[in-house]
């Protein structure tokens, strides 16, 4: 018997309110207080950084503040994105056993292929592009990402329906290396929208959602049923917003802490994303590590494993950092989306060798 997923649409909410609702869904599913769920959502103009990204490196903060663009931090990894009313967010929150998904890479492939199949029903040729994009003719139309929390998988995507790419360029700092890798002159060339592809034939929002649900239903072999948000979910989301997600301390939890004299750094870019690390020693003549900060657009499960790794490296001798990283991962269960633990080890070793 196919598992049934509740379908909800929470409409237009601020970036921080939407992220708080994400966390409420995860906690509710972990506690078996809600069923497996597909959620549609929308944002006012908002710049969102990934869970492990440096805020000021990724977002043009002054522009956003002067132009009323919201700023928020996701609970998922990945890169910075710009969201506005012309985009549609979608999310799946479910017990991994219900779809027999064992790892994040498999989850990304299955869910992205299902979403691409649904979008193709609209008359476009949408395809999954590893590691976590959906593209049409080489241009991204939907970015995705997610993580496991225990036996619950949270996976989300952003469908570009109608957007002015220059609004994205104005709000985000897109690394030149990412553009050069794809031979693109500017960030606007990396993306496309349903409006650009379909013109006057662009269907209404309900038709787009229906086709996406058809894709999920057919490819993931699930049943979907319209549902509603109950008062308890909204209360939990509001509490999470007020106590964590909506606070400046959470949004700016990684925000230029590396801009200090004596900080060592290194960057690694590969198929699994970009990892930039910053290391501070106890003093100018010391080899003992005082603090480590690991940032980037990578995906890792569980997300807090990066915080645990940073904490475990405090007090380590710089010459032993490689062994310390290996020892940490030997005793810690980690699921990274195409990012190898050797990447983290090597970039840290490069930083402290400087």
Image (cartoon, helix red, strand yellow):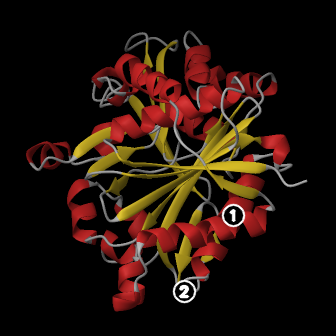
Q: Quadrant of residue 85?
A: bottom left
Q: Residue placed at 45% from the left, 23% from the top?
A: 235
Q: Which secondary structure, mark 2?
A: loop
Residue 247 seen in render: yes
- Please name whichever residue, 85 or 51, is drawn nearer the observer in this view of the structure: 85
Seen in the picture, residue 77 relative to 205 is either above or below; the reply is above
Residue 277 seen in render: no
Seen in the picture, residue 275 relative to 305 is either above or below; the reply is below
Mark 2, residue position: 124
Rendered location of residue 44, percent (x, y): 27, 51
Rendered location of residue 309, percent (x, y): 61, 23
Q: CA distance from mark 1 to mark 2?
A: 17 Å
Mark 1, residue position: 216
Q: Residue placed at 51% from the left, 48% from the top?
A: 78
Left or right of 323 in this view: 294: left
- Please name whichever residue, 206 or 117, is drawn nearer the observer in this view of the structure: 206
Would you call the spot at circle 2 few (<14 residues within 10 Å), some (14-19), or many (20 or more)?
A: some
Report the number of numbered marks. 2
Which is in the foreground here, disc 1 or disc 2?
A: 1
Q: Which secondary structure, mark 1?
A: helix
């Amino acid at each position: 018997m196919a598992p049934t997923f509740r379908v909800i649409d929470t409409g237009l909410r601020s970036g921080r309110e939407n992220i708080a609702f994400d966390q409420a869904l995860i906690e509710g599913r972990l506690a078996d207080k809600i069923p497996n769920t597909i959620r549609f959502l929308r944002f006012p103009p908002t710049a969102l950084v990934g869970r492990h990204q440096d805020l000021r490196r990724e977002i043009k903060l002054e522009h956003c503040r002067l132009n009323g663009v919201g700023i928020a931090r996701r609970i998922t990894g990945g890169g910075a994105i710009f969201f506005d009313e012309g985009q549609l967010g979608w999310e799946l929150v479910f017990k991994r056993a219900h779809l027999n998904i064992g790892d994040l890479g498999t989850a990304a492939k299955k869910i992205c292929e299902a979403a691409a199949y649904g979008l193709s029903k609209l008359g476009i040729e949408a395809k999954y592009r590893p590691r976590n994009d959906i593209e049409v003719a080489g241009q991204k139309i939907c970015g995705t990402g997610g993580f496991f929390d225990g036996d619950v998988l949270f996976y989300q995507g952003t469908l570009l329906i109608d957007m002015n790419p220059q609004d994205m360029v104005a709000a985000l700092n897109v690394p030149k290396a990412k553009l050069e890798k794809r031979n693109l002159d500017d960030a606007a060339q990396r993306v496309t929208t349903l409006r650009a592809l379909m013109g006057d034939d662009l269907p209404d929002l309900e038709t787009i959602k229906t086709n996406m649900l058809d894709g999920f239903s057919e490819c993931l072999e699930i049943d979907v049923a319209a549902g509603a948000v109950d008062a308890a979910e909204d209360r939990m989301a509001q509490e999470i917003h007020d106590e964590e997600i909506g606070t400046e301390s959470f949004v700016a939890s990684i925000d230029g802490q590396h801009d200090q004299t004596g900080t060592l750094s290194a960057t690694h870019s590969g198929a699994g994303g970009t990892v930039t690390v910053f290391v501070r020693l106890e003093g100018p003549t010391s080899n003992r590590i005082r603090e480590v900060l690991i940032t980037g657009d990578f995906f890792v499960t569980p997300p807090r494993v990066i915080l645990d790794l940073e904490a475990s490296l405090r007090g380590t001798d710089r010459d032993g950092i490689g062994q310390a990283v290996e020892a940490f991962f030997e005793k810690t269960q980690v699921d990274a989306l195409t990012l190898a633990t050797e990447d983290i080890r090597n970039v840290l070793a490069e930083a402290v060798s400087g």
